[in-house]
Amino acid sequence: MEDLTAKQECAGAFDAHHPPSSEIIDKCVHCGFCLPVCPTYVLWGQEMDSPRGRIYLMKMASEGATEMNATWVSHFDSCLGCMACMTACPSGVDYGKLIEATRAQIERETERSPGEKLHRRFMFETFTRPERLRRMRLPLLVYQKSGLQAVVRGLGLLKVLPKKMQAMEALLPKLGPREAVAEVTAAVGTNRRRVGLLLGCVQREFFSQVNAATARVLAAEGCEVVAPQAQPCCGALLVHAGEEAAAVELAKRTIDAFERADVETVITNAAGCGSNVKEYGHLLRDEPEYAERAIAFAAKCKDISELLTELEPRARRQRLKLRVAFHDSCHLQHAQGVRSQPRALLSSIPGLELTEIPEAPICCGSAGIFNLVQPDAATELGDRKAGLITQLKVDVVATGNPGCVLQMQSALARLGQMTPVVHTIQLLDASIRGESGESLWR
Ligand code: SF4
Ligand code: SF4
């Protein structure tokens, strides 16, 4: 009987498991205010690659007027999930929920080519497993430090690889020593708050200096920092790619780990992870044991810039004479609505001159795994952003997401620019420690 009900509720081409909500779809009044900020519409000018067009395609599928065929799927594969359309929409259309539900339908109901399946499996089995990323560090360090990378790039040998592999190589971070964050870091002076630190996967293994800086700044500002070593990947990449079942399991384990840590606040410093954990209530809504706990957990989650602007500054900031461009990560500005806080943190550093990058709402092309699965469009967007940054003549670019760091470093390098890209918290940490900004990228 339940199956029959489910079948009756099945919406057109979609299956019955949380199809994109007709209520949300019907909120779209087709005004088009979202079009100028949609990166794919900006690039190609095609209605079906705009938010309005994609919502129309969802409506057609839910009414059974189209199948989820290859062309239909391609318009969703090309969506960056950047959520710029949500910020621009005057009708409050929650496109985030629509695209998440659509992607889960695509992964369940359509078949990808063997090559595509393999590529996606590799990414999910690697980037969501910190222990596997750690095992990759040594061979990558040898590749970079031995000079082999420079030779391979210089001779153009990578051109024989498939485009997606070339994209992966181009995005490799410059690896240095791994800085571990202790399970517990004591607050400096009187303890103001006990906070948990979400370590991330790529952040933990390839940007460990960002986690170390985050823990130091929190401690300097009077927070006791708990970084549960047993915490898994939060599942952000999987949610954004429609791999719902695997994401649900990781979300449960993340909640377990932080409940055991007994913290008042959970700090994120990777915007993609932050936007994901803040939505755990939605992701775990069908899980009787976790639904309420997920809502409580999500309510505790804050980006590092949100917490630090709430706390009265305690640690003395020292002069950093740098001209800095701040890049808004989409998952911070659009998905979490965090814009003023990182700017306030940077502006609190004496001597630092903050500049704005034009076209701030438009994505740099990173967007989770977008630059790995859609390298051509990602390269165009990266080049566009890098061109705008170059005109500003800054010493450094600051941002709040590891994916954006990689994407912009690679795009700036294509233009022959060596402008460093760092996490905002690293500049604040350098200022509190009285170090020069240059020490971060020397
Ligand atoms: S999420 Fe970004 S790429 Fe996708 S429709 Fe919205 S603005 Fe366009
Ligand atoms: S701005 Fe909102 S209501 Fe207008 S077309 Fe875009 S999604 Fe629809």
Image (cartoon, rainbow, N blue to C red):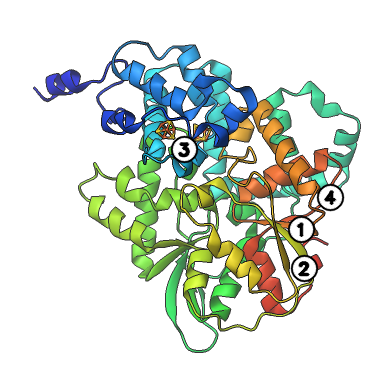
**Ligand 2: image quarter:** top left
Query: Disc 3 to disc 1, how far (Cα)?
Result: 29 Å
Say the numbered circle drawn on residue 240.
3
Mark 2, Cα crowd under 10 Å, few <14 / some 14-19 / many 20+, is many
Q: Compare marks 2 and 1 and give the one earlier in the sequence.
A: 1
Say the numbered circle drawn on residue 437.
2
The furthest residue to the left: 1
Q: Residue at x 20, y 47 (%)?
A: 288
Q: Is the residue marked 3 within 8 Å of ligand 1, measured from its CB?
A: no
Residue 363 x/y as whole percent: 60, 40
What amino acid type is highlighted by mark number 2?
Answer: Gly
Q: Residue at x 58, y 28 (%)?
A: 40
Q: Residue at x 55, y 70 (%)?
A: 182
Q: Is the residue marked 4 within 8 Å of ligand 1, measured from its CB?
A: no
| Dots 1, 4 in contact, CB < 8 A | no
Name above or below for residue 299 compared with residue 16. Answer: below
Q: Is residue 149 left or right of residue 55?
A: right
Query: Disc 2 to disc 4, how far (Cα)?
Result: 15 Å
Q: Say what secondary structure mark 3 lies in.
A: helix
Mark 3, Cα crowd under 10 Å, few <14 / some 14-19 / many 20+, is many
The furthest residue to the bottom: 189
Q: Is residue 430 left or right of residue 345?
A: right
Q: Compare marks 3 and 2 and give the one earlier in the sequence.
A: 3
| Dots 4, 3 in contact, CB < 8 A | no
Front position in the image: 270 or 141: 270
The furthest residue to the front: 31
What amino acid type is highlighted by mark number 1?
Answer: Val
Q: Compare marks 1 and 4 and give the one earlier in the sequence.
A: 1
Query: Disc 4 to disc 3, how far (Cα)?
Result: 31 Å
